[in-house]
Image (tube, rainbow, N blue to C red):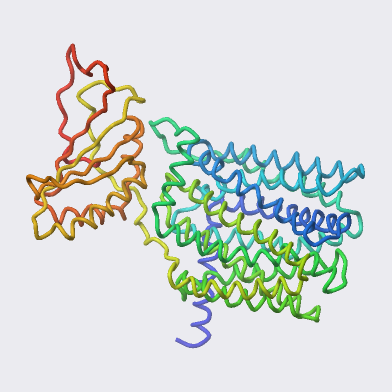
Amino acid sequence: MTAHSSQDSSFRRWRNATLEPFSNRVFALFWWASLFSSFGSLIQTVGASWLMATISPSADQVALVQTAGTLPFFFFSLVAGALADNYDRRVIMLASQLLMLLASLGLAVIALTGVINPALLLGFTFLIGSGVAAFSPAWQASIGDQVPRAQIPSAVMANAVGFNLARSVGPAIGGLIVAAAGASVAFIINAFSYFGMLAVLLWWRPVRARNPLPPEPLADAMAAGIRYVRLSPHLLAILARCILFTVPMATVPALMPVVARDLLGGGAATYGLLLGGFGVGAMLGALSSATLRARLSSDVLLRALCVLAAVALVAIGQSRSSVLTLLAHVLAGSVWTLGLANFNIAVQMSSPRWVMGRVLATYQTVAFAGMALGSWVWGQLGHGLGIREALTIAGVLMLVTLVVARWIPVAVAHAGSLDPHAFPVAGPPAVELHPASGPIVVTLEYRVPPQNAEAFVPAINELGRIRRRDGARRWSVCQDLDDPELWVERFESPTWTDYLRRQTRPTQGDQAARERIGALILGERGSVRRFIERPAGAEPLGGSGARPEPVDVSSTHT
């Protein structure tokens, strides 16, 4: 093969991997609508940040604009994720788009009437951020409804390309608009940018899988999402690395207006130029993602990004040249997008569909909490120590994450491991139960030869972690004192509906833990019994009249 044909083949593979999601009409329409919305959002960002820089020139007040826009993710993402997993995601996205539209119009009105002040600006920025926080988990989780699972990484990066395409041009346009017509016009343009997404959402009619079980109560759904993440070590590693990345990287967008004003002596157009450079770098990073992901593991790529981030932060802080500062912002934008997109992909590819919205919401809560915290911290340090010093300290802190990364590597689940695992359906109980009846107690008896007991203990504890992650309560395992080969596993579900809901959650990857148990016990699996706890004085179930024959559940999933 000639060098030319080899390069052509590489380009073709890159092009196919990058453009593959656009073969799905729904995704293509959403991509264009999101692109226009992103233009409006970035123009609004320029308007809000520069308006704050003019009415309150303190660095910490300017940085609070970034904090106000990202803090809603900390407060509302988990609620939005729980709603996205239990209700119509399309309706949730429509409602959140309307909230952002009304908040943008409100901000434009108070800016036009001249009653704007820092508190009102931050308040309306918070409302717009709240709409984004409500929209984002449903939007991210719906990518799996727009493209096949194998195309999710490409779809995530395609969305990043669209956003950063807007970022590369929108801020410069925003800077010109603010300089020529004022921030209020930027806010009006942002309001109009939501109409494309609203139109596509009104047109879209996704096919929803029929679920015979009722939605989880909101508090229970949120708790289930938190529990799933807490009992998933690979997800905890992703979240830990994410916050270590976002806290120092938040310095760049948070202090960018002050860098333009104080370090470069520029105005709104200079700020727009820096934000545009950041966007160009972000787009380049997104376009290079397919090639980098094919050659590097997620963990290695994220470590390399930490080094590049440190270089960009120190360069911005110490540069005396406008050109060098702009180039450092291009590098920072590339690192920013590659880092956050790869964290997002790792989360999406490591979460089953039933909890996808809540896991993505947890990730976004952590990521945006890191951004909000970083924006506030670096704003305070910039105000107290100086802008150059704050940026340099952030760059040094980024290098510290390389040391921590050795103990918390980022890994992505294998393809197919999170697909549902089909078990034989357990038969109905021999007594009539109300859906809210409970608690339901399940016991499994295992015969473990003495020579396998030492290996059985960690294997059964790993299975216990999976059961608790999927919703089992009060899990325990006991060994019979009079018959040491007999082990009994016990756990509960709060209600019969919760028991049935947990039956739908095992994945192909979980089956490996059950197979390890099966290799250590006598027989294919343990003997299963199902009970319901009865309070003192309660009448027995099935005490009179005819009742169904008892059902053997020993071969079903419990």
Taking the spot 33% from the left edge, 25% from the top edge, the residue there is: 437
User: Relative to 89, is 388 above or below?
Assistant: below
Front residue of 54 and 95 = 54
In the image, 177: left or right of 81? right
Work out whether 481 lies above or below 155. Answer: above
* Residue 94 picture quarter: top right
- Position of 12 with respect to 509 (left or right) is right
Side of 182 where 393 appears, left or right? left
Judge whether residue 385 can be spotted in this image.
yes
Residue 454 picture location, percent across and down: 16, 60
Q: Is residue 247 left or right of residue 256?
A: left
The number of numbered badges drawn on the structure is 0
**x, y (%) of residue 501?**
35, 36
Image quarter of the C terminus: top left
- The residue at the point 25 percent across, 43 percent down is 423
Q: Residue furthest top?
A: 545
Q: Nearer the viewer, residue 122 or 50?
A: 122
Instruction: Examine the image and state in which quarter residue 337 appears.
Output: bottom right
User: Residue 291, can we see it?
Assistant: no
Closer to the camera in the image, 270 or 395: 395
Query: Which residue corresponds to the image point at 86% horizontal and 56% vertical from the top-left?
Result: 56
User: Residue 368 in the image: x percent, y percent?
Assistant: 61, 55
For the N terminus, the quadrant is bottom left
- Whether 8 is drawn above or below 520: the answer is below
Q: Considering only vertical position in the picture, is 164 above or below 358?
A: below
The percent position of residue 369, horizontal first and vertical second, equals 61, 54
